[in-house]
Amino acid sequence: KLQALIFDVDGTLADTERDGHRVAFNRAFAEAGLDWDWTVELYGELLAVTGGKERMKFYLDKYRSDFQRPNNLDEFIAGLHKAKTKHYTQLLSEGSIPLRPGVKRLLDEARAQGFRLAIATTTTPANVTALLESTLGHESIAWFDVIAAGDIVPAKKPAPDIYFYALEQMQIAPQDCIAFEDSHNGLISADKANLKTIVTINDYTKDQDFPGAVVVLDHLGDPGMPFTVLSGEVGW
Ligand code: XBP
Ligand code: MG
């Protein structure tokens, strides 16, 4: 029986990538005096790798053989990533990124009906709290039994580790949960953790494959959607 809803954050709760993370990366690069500029299109390719630090390394490996790497590359990347998080949380605190359609209604309805909520994401914990605070208010952080995020597990999505961690923290079986994802990597991660998954696509993920998804939707904003999800009518 369905007892809990586990949400991805980036691309699922909100469209954070193009106007949030990407912009924050570029601000951090400019601030550091780097000539790195991640266009909307290039960023779509870089999204193949989850995690901001991992994504920057992927960019260097794949596109910037010309870049003179410092000896302490990991430290250098970590410094850039810290600046990026500062810019990202700043952007969110200005209220520039809203929740996707239907997300608030689903959360409200799920809470009213006593379902448990959790988050499983590769993004940095501070980014999750910044999004929740700016869209749903500070008290919404406590709506979630666990906020599994970032480097708490070393292997990021598509590895299932972050979902295993969330399930372990909640002491719940995967068959009693449903996951919400927006991307191929996210779906694979949830699937490997034996979770049924509802996918809501966005501009960056609409052409990806979603093998084994319960359903692939444009968004959760249709009028009957919360009820449909919570009653299990979506088909699992
Ligand atoms: C989200 C991500 C994140 C963000 C950046 O993937 O890949 O890396 O782009 O966050 P998912 P950080 O939605 O599958 O969890 O820079 O904080 O790592
Ligand atoms: Mg996502």
Image (spheres, helix red, strand yellow):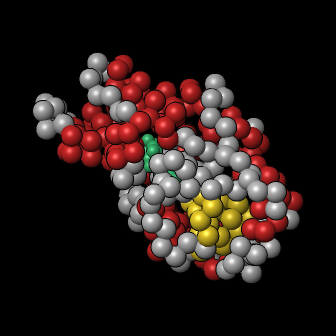
Q: Is residue 46 left or right of residue 172?
A: left
Q: Is residue 163 left or right of residue 233?
A: left
Query: In x, y percent, where is residue 85?
Result: 47, 33
Is residue 146 something one can see in this rendering?
A: no
Q: Work out whether 141 lies above or below 229.
A: above
Query: In x, y percent, where is residue 89?
Result: 55, 31
Quadrant position of the C terminus in the picture: bottom right
Query: In x, y percent, where is residue 12?
Result: 59, 52
Residue shown at 37% from the left, 33% from the top: 39
Q: Work out whether 209 lies above or below 212.
A: above
Count of numbered circles on the image: 0
Residue shown at 52% from the left, 34% from the top: 20
Outermost residue, right side: 112
Residue shown at 68% from the left, 34% from the top: 134
> Closer to the camera, 168 or 204?
204
The quarter of the picture where residue 57 lies is: top left
Query: In x, y percent, where is residue 40?
Result: 41, 36
Is residue 215 something one can see in this rendering?
A: yes
Residue shown at 50% from the left, 55% from the top: 206
> Closer to the camera, 166 or 131?
131
Q: Is residue 218 left or right of residue 136?
A: left
> Closer to the camera, 189 or 209?
209
> Closer to the camera, 55 or 146?
55
Quadrant position of the N terminus in the picture: bottom right
